[in-house]
Image: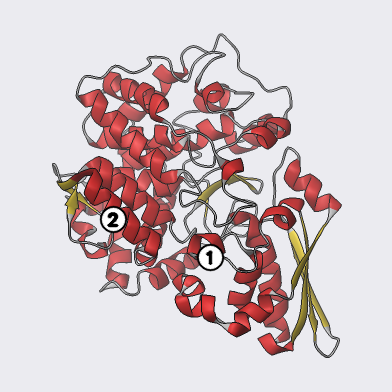
Amino acid sequence: MTTTEHAASTVASPGASADPGDDDVTATVAAFAAELRYEDVAAPVLHRIKLHLLDAIGCAVAGSDLDISRSARAVASRMGSGGASRVFGTQERFTPIAAAFANSVIANALDYDDGFEVNGKGMGHPSASLVPAALAALGRRPVCGRAFLVALAAAYEINNRLILAMQPSAARFRQVYGIGQHQAIGAALVFARLSGCDVAGIRNAIGLAGALTPLPSLHKYNWQSRPIISLKDGVAPAAQAGVQAAIMSEEGFVGSADLLDGPQGYWRMIGSDRFDASLVVDGLGTLWLAGKGSFKTYPACRWLAPALEAFENAYVKARLTPAAIAQVRVATFGIIADKLMERRPLNPIDAQFSLPHLIGAIATGRPSGPSWFSAGAFADEALREVADKVEVCVDPAMDRLMNGRMRRPSAAVEVVTTDGRRFASEVVAPLGGERRPVDDGVVLDKAARNLGGRGDAAGLIAAILAIENCDDVAGLFDECF
């Protein structure tokens, strides 16, 4: 059984819980993060990390002109300008903490950034916290490509294992959950490693990151009082917390020495009711989860991806026009009916959680990306007319699948035309994860589109895919900013 399979079966078990004897997790994690060598990481894992890095950079570039990104840069200026760190969309320099916050907001601005999934269950947006934290460490001293990759490998590995190990029961998930809060730990690891911290320094940074972790807030996203909150995935506070924790450790602050250990560990602190320490430590360094992330194919909430794909499959295959649509019927899980059917979203982030708006964007032929959230899209009467024709019903089987232990989104769509024809499609899990993987070409094509407005996009993609040959990666990314 692979680590992923073991993880999926353990997370599914209602009896999984912390063993009070699990008292060496923090020490094991710190040692792994500090001592991992480039040669220790399997080539396929390194390749996947480069793809995730490329995807994150592309998402940040594509999202850097959104209003939320301009606000993030303004906040960064007030938090700390004049440092060595870069932020997407400006030539200004910032302190590492300010840059990590802003770049994380920007990488996540389009909701196009990657995730981590097991069997369709999404568990955070790793790159939107980890890549900004890694970028924030650049500029103070040279960092070669191999050092950059191995630091990211350690951070992704611990991030993915930690969230798997902390998955709550279905009952606890309905009470409290956070999308990216745990990513503060990975952000602390990658920044501390690239800053030259030893095992003790990284362990201390982990403890401080735990104290700075933002509250899990999924159930308070303004679902019923739109617009959706600006920090909708928690990735930016996590990136900020991780970088701040590592810097505080460098400056003598003392953190918890055993944050991840025991029955009152980090898992309990951020709201879970169970923890399987074996998923964090077993096979660490030999069985890899760092390369198991998922890639988004739509700039939207991942829960909506099956409905969007099903609509696109039916609509494009039928060669319809917006005017030909009489009704779009979506059968899916109840959360969409309850929370994601706002027909007149108020801003781009709000629209990323609006199934009617997103279906309207596809129907009106807008290319996937910023154009879905442009002023023209919000004013498009044809898009609005399609949005008004979208109806949702709750499919009991899909609802059980989403609200039970698997938390897997799925959807079936029927498009009814004005002349009575019907076109249907069903999608059982989001595209781009391990259950339904995409090949490298899909990721590279997405990156090329997202980077299209930044000079030599092809050259930048090639450079990132060969980053291990770079003597100092800070200069490699200059063109992106």
From the image, which quarter does the N terminus lie in? top right
Looking at the image, residue 423 sits to the left or right of residue 448; the answer is right
* Residue picked out by circle 2: 73
- Dot 2 alpha-carbon crowd within 10 angstroms: few under 14, some 14 to 19, many 20 or more: many
Q: Position of residue 341 (x, y in %)?
A: 68, 62
Other residues around mark 1 within 10 Å, as few (<14) / some (14–19) / many (≥20): few
Residue at the top extreme, as displayed: 21
Vertically, is 248 above or below 194?
A: above
* Residue at horizontal 13 percent and vertical 42 percent from the top: 141
Q: Tell me which residue sits at (46%, 14%) in the image.
A: 24
Choose top left, top right, bottom left or bottom right for residue 427: bottom right
201 or 307: nearer the viewer: 307
Q: Secondary structure at mark 1?
A: loop
Instruction: Tell me which label, 1 or 2, sits earlier in the chain.
Output: 2
Q: Indicate the amino acid at tag 1.
A: Leu
The numbered dot on residue 431 is none
The reply, left or right, for residue 241 in relation to residue 388 is left
Farthest residue in the front direction?
225
* Residue at which label 1 appears: 346
Q: Nearer the viewer, residue 297 or 178?
A: 178
Q: Is residue 321 visible?
A: no
| Residue 104 vertical position relative to residue 176 in the rendered view, above or below | below
User: What residue appears at the point 70 percent right and 79 percent down from the top-left corner?
Assistant: 315
